[in-house]
Image (cartoon, rainbow, N blue to C red):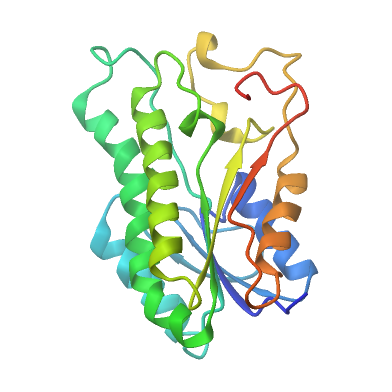
Amino acid sequence: MKSLGNILITGGASGLGAATVEAVSRYGGTPLVLDKAAPEADVAHARADLADRASAEDAVRELVEGTGGRLDAVFTAAGVDSCGALDSVSAADWERVVGVNLLGTVAVVRRALPYLLASEGTVVTCSSTLGLKAVPDATAYCASKAGVLGFSRSLAAETAGRVAVTTLVPGGMHTSFFEGRDEQYKPPADAKLNRPEDVAETVVFALRQPPGCEVREMVVCSSEESSWP
């Protein structure tokens, strides 16, 4: 297993991103957090809105150049949702989901790519089981996460032998992701969901693969996940 080095984590202030920050630190890596909010962990971070391409790109440059100009990996954990039927979700809210989840992922990876090519690094993107299995009242989320999967597969082919690319496909987790929703869009109290700390371990597993060995895609979910298969 290779050492981790400098790992840029979007959405690193909460949920799976924050759990991955802790895991990377525990395994001897250096997490660099890009998020709208400041992380609780004492790590290098930059605040940016991933729906704003210029802001996201500037934050990547600031973080990498501020830590010596080397970047070994990127994990794009940041994600948002806006639940509801297509004709009930405003166009602005719908497009923001795609802007953060898909276009924000692309912006960060694009800006980080020169650094990753130099280090022969790794990209781990975050899709979702709902990028594979569609459900009602989630057109924006499903479209964005399916887009992440397609983007990642194409990127893996494009950078083969130069940058490793893994797509994480997680199921539901016990995070704040579901807060603020109408009750009908929240998991029931007895829902079987994964702990983000456990999913973060799988991210580190992908990041630590030796050169030339890549985990292309990982579906990581509760054994009773309703959205898989």
Total marks in image? 0
Residue 144 lies, in percent from the top left, at 37, 38
Residue 130 lies, in percent from the top left, at 50, 29
Residue 50 lies, in percent from the top left, at 35, 53
Determine the image quadrant of residue 176.
Answer: top right
Q: Residue at x 26, y 55 (%)?
A: 52
Between 129 and 46, the residue placed more toward the observer is 129
In this rendering, the answer to whether 10 lies above or below 62 is above
Between 115 and 92, the residue placed more toward the observer is 115
Residue 146 lies, in percent from the top left, at 41, 37
Which residue in the rendered view is the most extreme toward the top?
Answer: 184
In this rendering, the answer to whether 111 lies above or below 47 is below
Between 202 and 29, the residue placed more toward the observer is 202
Q: Residue at x 50, y 24 (%)?
A: 133
Q: Is residue 49 visible?
A: no
Side of 184 relative to 29 (left or right): left
Which residue in the rendered view is the most extreme toward the left?
Answer: 91
The quadrant of the image that shows the N terminus is bottom right
Which residue in the rendered view is the most extreme toward the bottom?
Answer: 68
The quadrant of the image that shows the C terminus is top right
In this rendering, the answer to whether 197 lies above or below 191 is below
Q: Is residue 162 visible?
A: yes
Side of 94 relative to 130 (left or right): left
Q: Residue at x 36, y 46 (%)?
A: 102
Q: Residue at x 34, y 71 (%)?
A: 111
Between 153 and 136, the residue placed more toward the observer is 153
